[in-house]
Image (tube, grey):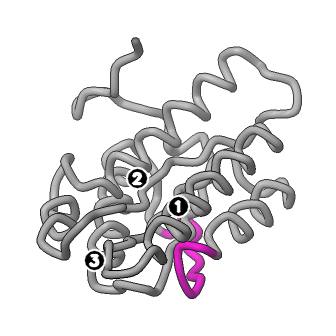
Amino acid sequence: MGKAPSPSEKLPAGDLRLAVVLSRYNEDIVTALLQGARAAWVAHGGREASLRVEHVPGAFELPLAARAFALGGSVDAIVALGCVIRGATAHFEYVAGECARGLQRVMLDTGIPIGFGVLTVDTRAQALERAVPGAQNKGYEALETALTMASLLRRLQVKGAL
């Protein structure tokens, strides 16, 4: 098993081009995730102005936006941020599952790493717990994951990636 980077570990944000795609649905929670991602970017040496951020309507649309970035060749990694809260219908399973499946497909098809920061929770309270400021913020974690994977692929010099 690998380990997540420690908060003090420096990942080379300044050397990488990242994009963040985020859902407008549950916007207050996703905004808090974005703040976490921005904090991680800066903590690892990235310039805040160089982090590209684009919005999509909901989590279901995240894979298409991620695919556009990945195929466009302008990024080394992507961070996907969203929040899907379980409701009384099966809608949650379709949206959450297809979002995750779509993002994984983009990653595997293109070789561009995607940090998965899409909360899939039962309650709003659970979402808020995962969007608190600091290194436990899931947006922060997703950005660190994207940096870690982009750095790994660069070190391995994987053909078709970075």
At x 59%, y 40%, the residue is 15
Q: Earlier in the sequence, mark 2 or mark 1?
A: 2
Quadrant of the rendered image containing residue 98? bottom right
What residue span does the magenta drawing correspond to? Answer: 49-60
Where is 14 relative to 1, above or below?
A: below
Mark 1 — residue? Answer: 80
Query: What amino acid does circle 2 point to?
Result: Trp
Query: What amino acid does circle 1 point to?
Result: Ala
Toward the viewer: 18 or 79?
79
Mark 2 — residue? Answer: 41
Mark 3 — residue? Answer: 29
Q: Earlier in the sequence, mark 2 or mark 3?
A: 3
Q: Is residue 123 left or right of residue 43?
A: left
At x 73%, y 47%, the residue is 105
Query: What amino acid does circle 3 point to?
Result: Ile
Q: Identify the element where label 3 is drawn.
A: helix
Toward the viewer: 128 or 123?
123
